[in-house]
Amino acid sequence: MSKSKWIVVILLCTMACGLWTKEAECRNIVLKSLVVNPSKTKTQTAMLKAYLPKETKPEDIIDLGDLKIDYDITNALYYIYKEFKLAPGESTMRQIEIKDIWVLSREEVDSLNVRAKELFEQLRETAYVKTAIIQQRNIKNKVADILTRQEKAMDAIPQTHIAAYRQNQEAVGSIKDMLAELEKMVIEAKIISGPAAGRVSVRASWWVILAVIISLGVLSLIFFIIWHRQAGITVTQDRKKEEMKTEEPPYSSKETKEK
């Protein structure tokens, strides 16, 4: 292996090891990179290239120094780079300062607990209350874990700090899934039994509709019976009149004249 290749290997190893420090005062993260020419006799050129954490955007960088930044479409990551020409045995260090964006706000985390409590109150008097109690307890425990993990990682090395943030992000996603399940229960509970204001439930509504249909059917039957009876009476009266006409004896012509 040539010496120029050794420069690249040392550079990539330095990036992988992550020579990171953390500024306690401003809570910013500083990435330091060391480039070394291992040759004792030959001047060599190497390209410093280091990928930034996936959450980092150009606007998050406070101080880039004399380095440049670009975006790798394939890896979907920003990276810093610069070409160096180093004399035999020479080394150089570069650093960039990044805002600590790997922190969840207390308000954001606490709002998860508040929302869980609100949904539980809506489910207190429903058939879902037992499930809601378990879900609210799980959410409360997860929120406590998030805050504890973040507090412990605040003064840790950047790798640990960022790893804790990503773990907390996954926990927040899990909590949001639980909240979505509670919201679904609230909707189902409203459909089944209605809110406390006293709306008629779906089942009761169907019973009312069925009762109205039956009542209309009974009324129709009563009207039909009355109509049928009246029609029968009319037919009977007409028949009697016809019979009376046919039973009267015909008058003779003489009787007619006398009359």
Image (tube, grey):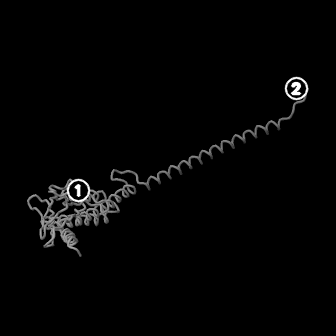
Residue 160 image position (x, y, % from top left)? 18, 68
Question: Which labelled disc corresponds to residue 234?
Answer: none
Residue 235 vertical position relative to residue 141 in the rendered view, above or below: above
Residue 162 vertical position relative to residue 1 in the rendered view, above or below: above
User: Are there few (<14), some (14-19), or many (20+) residues within 10 Å of tag 1?
Assistant: some
Residue 231 image position (x, y, % from top left)? 68, 42
Q: Secondary structure at mark 1?
A: loop
Name the foreground residue: 187 vs 179.
179
When asked about the image quadrant of residue 43, the answer is bottom left
Name the foreground residue: 114 vs 151.
151
Question: Which labelled disc corresponds to residue 256?
Answer: 2
Position of residue 78 in the picture relative to residue 65 (left or right):
right
User: Are there few (<14), some (14-19), or many (20+) residues within 10 Å of tag 2?
Assistant: few
Name the foreground residue: 189 vs 221.
189
Work out whether mark 1 precedes mark 2 in sequence or the reverse, and give the earlier one. 1
Residue 78 image position (x, y, % from top left)? 25, 59
Q: Secondary structure at mark 2?
A: helix
Position of residue 131 in the picture relative to residue 202 (left or right):
left
Marks 1/2: CA–CA distance: 127 Å
Q: Amino acid at mark 2?
A: Thr
Quadrant containing the C terminus is: top right
Residue at position x 12%, y 64% from top?
22
Residue 71 image position (x, y, % from top left)? 27, 58
Q: Residue furthest front?
A: 41
When asked about the image quadrant of residue 52, the answer is bottom left
Question: Which labelled disc corresponds to residue 57?
Answer: 1
Residue 61 vertical position relative to residue 256 in the rendered view, above or below: below
Does residue 238 appear in the picture of this structure? Answer: yes
Residue 93 vertical position relative to residue 249 in the rendered view, above or below: below
Q: Amino acid at mark 1?
A: Lys
Residue at position x 15%, y 72% from top?
39
